[in-house]
Amino acid sequence: MKQTAVIVQAVGEAPIAAEIMAKAITDIAAATKEIMSAGLKYETVVTLIHAHSGVSKKDIRLVLNNLVCFKETWCSQ
């Protein structure tokens, strides 16, 4: 059964401003697009990340595929 991650704000921690979150999302999406267009084949990028992190290739593919459209999915502007 899949579990949903739960993010809990620490006591006394101020919420992150929407503008900061939007900028981070935009930067992540741009960086992912840059990595994917850097000249390495897609499977090479997946293999390098897998070798370095130990994360399954299936999960890496899922994350990479979704990060490319991260901005369009989560930012309205």
Image (cartoon, helix red, strand yellow):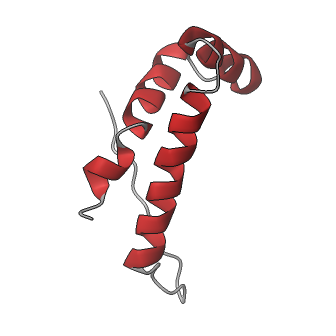
Taking the spot 51% from the left edge, 46% from the top edge, the residue there is: 30
Q: Nearer the viewer, residue 51 or 19?
A: 19
Q: Nearer the viewer, residue 47 or 5?
A: 47
The image quadrant of residue 45 is top right
| Residue 53 picture location, percent across and down | 70, 27
For residue 57, above or below residue 6 = above
Q: Nearer the viewer, residue 63 or 38?
A: 38
For residue 8, above or below residue 34 = below
For residue 54, above or below residue 14 = above
| Residue 71 picture location, percent across and down | 36, 51
| Residue 74 picture location, percent across and down | 29, 55
In the image, taking residue 40 as reference, residue 16 lies left or right, namely left
Taking the spot 64% from the left edge, 26% from the top edge, the residue there is: 38
Taking the spot 41% from the left edge, 77% from the top edge, the residue there is: 19
Residue 10 visible at all: yes
Q: As drawn, which residue projects farthest toward the left?
A: 76
Split into 4 quadrants, where in the image is the N terminus? Answer: top left
Taking the spot 56% from the left edge, 26% from the top edge, the residue there is: 37
